[in-house]
């Protein structure tokens, strides 16, 4: 069995020939060994109806931009599809980078909160500092999510809660610092 992209090409060629066969016999057909371009909307329809395309609706929507509507041959359409795919991959990579930044921020928060709980008695001033520096890490996470245009309600809520815990931690360590001033 032929690969799916060859089947699509055969389908496009067949439909091109079929549409040309309805022309009157006195129509001028170029003698050059070049196929006539199929209108872009027809190119898109043919592609999106191809068995190899998993999601016809997505295909039609993704290929409905003015730039794609203006293409006149399969190679141009293919080139634009590849550019769209690359742009989508870049956007996804940016989202993943943002998520990775958040993963690191939360790992840092876990370690810091655990460390601060052991510092509360021995060194409230250090505990105060250690809890305060969690905030900028969480702010970085939030900034990266916004820059990547990533809408992640659970992460945004987690960031908000983390800020609350940081402020509570800062409040309690400040209180402990006042109650137990350390001599330097």
Image (tube, grey):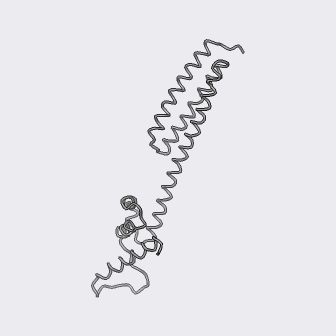
From the top left corner, tell me how far across and down residue 78 is, in percent. Answer: 46, 67
Q: Is residue 85 above or below residue 146?
A: below
Q: Is residue 170 left or right of residue 153?
A: right
From the top left corner, tell me how far across and down residue 157 is, in percent. Answer: 46, 34
Toward the front, the furthest residue is 1
Q: Is residue 14 above or below residue 54?
A: below
- Quarter holding the C terminus is top right
Q: Residue at x 56, y 40 (%)?
A: 103
Towards the viewer: 141 or 38: 141
From the top left corner, tell me how far across and down residue 147 is, in percent. Answer: 50, 43
Q: Is residue 113 above or below residue 31?
A: above
Q: Residue at x 68, y 14 (%)?
A: 182
Quarter where residue 125 is shown: top right
Q: Residue at x 58, y 15 (%)?
A: 175
Q: Is residue 151 left or right of residue 170?
A: left
Q: How many marks?
A: 0
Towards the viewer: 26 or 81: 81
Toward the left, the furthest residue is 24
Q: Residue at x 35, y 71 (%)?
A: 39
Q: Is residue 66 left or right of residue 181?
A: left
């Amino acid at each position: 069995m032929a690969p799916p992209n060859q089947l699509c090409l055969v389908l496009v060629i067949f439909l091109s020939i079929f549409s040309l066969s309805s022309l009157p016999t006195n129509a001028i057909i170029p003698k050059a060994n070049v196929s006539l371009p199929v209108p872009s909307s027809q190119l898109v329809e043919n592609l999106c109806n191809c068995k190899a395309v998993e999601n016809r609706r997505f295909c039609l929507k993704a290929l409905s931009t003015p730039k794609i509507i203006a293409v006149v041959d399969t190679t141009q359409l293919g080139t634009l599809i590849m550019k769209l795919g690359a742009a989508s991959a870049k956007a996804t990579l940016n989202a993943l980078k943002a998520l990775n930044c958040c993963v690191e921020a939360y790992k840092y928060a876990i370690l810091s909160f655990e460390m601060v709980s052991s510092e509360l008695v021995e060194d409230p001033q250090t505990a105060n500092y250690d809890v305060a520096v969690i905030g900028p890490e969480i702010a970085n996470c939030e900034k990266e999510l916004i820059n990547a245009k990533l809408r992640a309600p659970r992460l945004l809520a987690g960031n908000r809660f983390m800020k609350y815990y940081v402020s509570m931690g800062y409040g309690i360590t400040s209180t402990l610092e006042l109650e137990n001033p350390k001599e330097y």
